[in-house]
Structures are given as structure tokens and as C-alpha cells.
Amino acid sequence: MTEPVGVVLVSHSPAMAAGLAELLRELGSRTVPVVLAAGTEDGSLGTSYDRIVAALAEADSGSGVVVLPDLGSSVLTAVTVLADHPRPDAVLVDAPFVEGAVAAVVTASAGAALAEVVAAAQDARGFRKF
């Protein structure tokens, strides 16, 4: 069996990303690598190029990585990292942060391939809450 697709959460807030990671652990990330690239090196709010680079390497178990940014500069920083370090097995996904992460982890935990995990995260944009 191949290793599951990894997930990188790129967030301005270490606390918010940690809370989401806690939820994801209950939904399947005990087997799916979920790595945080949240906040700056000094623990402040913001995004970090170096943290994203490190998170990509850590989350990659050989089956690819889905990168989910929260908003604004986290998207721009992730785009820059992937432009500077192109890798066909890392996909930046335009999806809602929480719902996209949940869909990605649940799908990856079922053994889905990278394209299926990306599609699940993207499809989360259409989830209705009521």
C-alpha cells in the first residue's frame, strides 16, 4: 500500500492551524501527514516562506502534498514557494480552509491519489451547511 497524500496547512495564525489540526487528527490524520506552516519564526501572526518549504518536505511521504492556505499573504507566500521550488507532486488548492482540509484528510485517509484529494478539497467550496 502506498503512503497517503500529505496536507500542509498554511495559516497566519499558529493557534487557528493547531485547532484545525486537532480536529483533523480525529478525522483521519493519524495516518495522513498534516503539517502546519503557521505564523512567523518568532510565533507572531503572519506567514513564513521557510516554514512552508520545511512543511512541504515534512508532509511528503511520496504520494504528493496538498497545500491549503487560509487567505491573503499565505496564498501569495505559498505561490512563491511553489514557483521557486517547482514540484508536480505539490498542489496549491483554492478551497475553504476548514472544509477543504477536512475533505482532503478524509479522502487521503481512504487511500485516494493526489488528484482525488485535490478534487475533494476543491469540492468543499460547494458544501452547504443547511
Image (cartoon, rainbow, N blue to C red):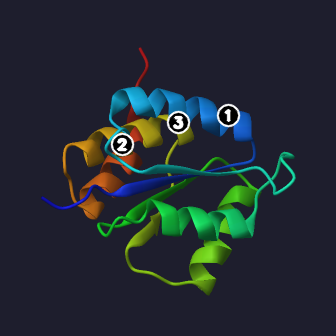
Q: What residue would you read off at disc 3?
A: 21
Q: Amino acid at mark 3?
A: Ala
Q: Residue at x 76, y 57 (%)?
A: 47
Q: Position of residue 54 (x, y in %)?
A: 60, 67
Quadrant in which residue 60 is drawn: bottom left
Q: Badge 1: few (under 14), some or many (20 or more) residues near its Cα, within 10 Å?
A: some
Examine the rendered structure and indicate whether residue 30 appears above or below residue 65. above
Circles 2, 3 touching at the beta carbon (< 8 Å): no
Q: Amino acid at mark 1?
A: Met
Q: Alpha-carbon distance for marks 3 and 1? A: 9 Å
Q: Quadrant of the C terminus?
A: top left
Q: Alpha-carbon distance for marks 2 and 1? A: 17 Å
Q: Amino acid at mark 2?
A: Val
User: Can residue 56 be seen from the camera position used here?
Assistant: yes
In the rendered structure, find residue 50 and report the number of the disc placed on it: none
Q: Badge 3: few (under 14), some or many (20 or more) residues near its Cα, within 10 Å?
A: many
Q: Is residue 9 found left or right of 39 in the rendered image? A: left
Of labels 2 and 3, earlier in sequence is 3
Q: What residue would you read off at disc 1?
A: 16
Q: Residue at x 83, y 47 (%)?
A: 43
Q: Position of residue 56 (x, y in %)?
A: 52, 66
Q: Position of residue 90 (x, y in %)?
A: 44, 70
Quadrant in which residue 106 is drawn: top left
Of labels 3 and 1, earlier in sequence is 1
Tell us which disc is closer to us: 2 or 3.
Answer: 3
Of labels 2 and 1, earlier in sequence is 1
Q: Position of residue 10 (x, y in %)?
A: 63, 53
Secondary-structure class at tag 2:
helix
Q: Residue at x 29, y 62 (%)?
A: 114
Q: Residue at x 40, y 25 (%)?
A: 128
Quadrant in which residue 100 is drawn: top left
